[in-house]
Image (spheres, helix red, strand yellow):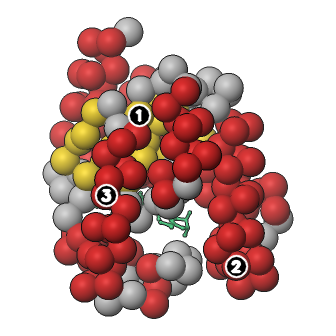
Amino acid sequence: MDLILIGFMGSGKTTISQLLGERLGLPVTDLDQVIVETAERSIAAIFAEQGEVGFRLLETQALAAQLDQPGILATGGGVPTQEQNRELLQRHAAPVILLEIAPETAYERVKADKHRPIAKNLNLAELAALKASRQAYYQSCADLVVDANQTPETIVNEIIDYFQAIN
Ligand SMILES: Nc1ncnc2c1ncn2[C@@H]1O[C@H](COP(=O)(O)OP(=O)(O)OP(=O)(O)O)[C@@H](O)[C@H]1O
Ligand SMILES: O=C(O)C1=C[C@@H](O)[C@@H](O)[C@H](O)C1
Ligand SMILES: [Mg+2]
């Protein structure tokens, strides 16, 4: 991979990766989508049938398999919570960009979407607590932190400035 996006649910990893792909002319891979295509089941179905532990195993396998592919990788929101995933991200040469989002903004963005099995049962306070419990993991993987409460265009411009400065 040339660029990897991490961040909490609703921070915009999927959205921003698509825009970056268009601007940089690079292929885009969404790890959640890879898992769904490989397992031939939705994320909600994987959680229901195999639990979060089963989902995390598939996620680590997918991450390891994708890292050697070219382009931009949008990870799932829980990727940095797993030690093996953090090691994979830290060992890989591609810059890791953390999209940093306020819990209130994340909540507003994901509350109507029932496809996220973890978020769909949480109120704002619980979502904020989950994010706080993960924050050190996100930070420990990040080469650059971008304020994801801004417009998509501003976020993309900041990431492209960084990407061009290091390449
Ligand atoms: N910068 C932004 N400004 C306004 N809305 C945004 C922005 N980024 C994303 N959104 C919207 O927020 C919602 C969640 O975005 P997205 O699916 O890209 O997040 P994600 O980080 O990939 O989440 P997940 O970790 O669950 O995969 C979408 O409806 C998207 O259109
Ligand atoms: O933050 C999380 O734990 C998750 C985020 C999504 O991208 C999916 O990977 C799944 O819904 C779990
Ligand atoms: Mg996503």
Residue at 70% across, 79% down? 51
Residue at 49% across, 57% down? 81
Tag 3: amino acid: Gln
Question: Which residue is tagged 1?
Answer: 96
In what quadrant of the picture does the N terminus appear? top right
Residue at 81% across, 62% down? 39
Q: Can the viewer see residue 50 in this picture? A: yes
Task: State the image coordinates of residue 122 (x, y, percent, origin top left).
Answer: 39, 87
Q: Secondary structure at mark 3?
A: helix
Give the crowd class for mark 1: few <14, some 14-19, many >=20 residues within 10 Å.
many
Of mark 1 and mark 3, the one earlier in the sequence is: 1
Question: Which residue is tagged 3?
Answer: 135
| Side (left or right) of 67 relative to 113 | right
Count of numbered tags: 3
Image quadrant where residue 66 sits: top right
In what quadrant of the picture does the C terminus appear? top left
Disc 2/disc 1 C-alpha distance (Å): 28 Å
Tag 2: amino acid: Gly
Residue at 47% across, 36% down? 4
Q: Quick check: marks 1 and 3 in contact, CB under 8 Å?
A: no
Task: State the image coordinates of residue 90 (x, y, percent, origin top left).
Answer: 49, 32
Question: Which residue is tagged 2?
Answer: 51
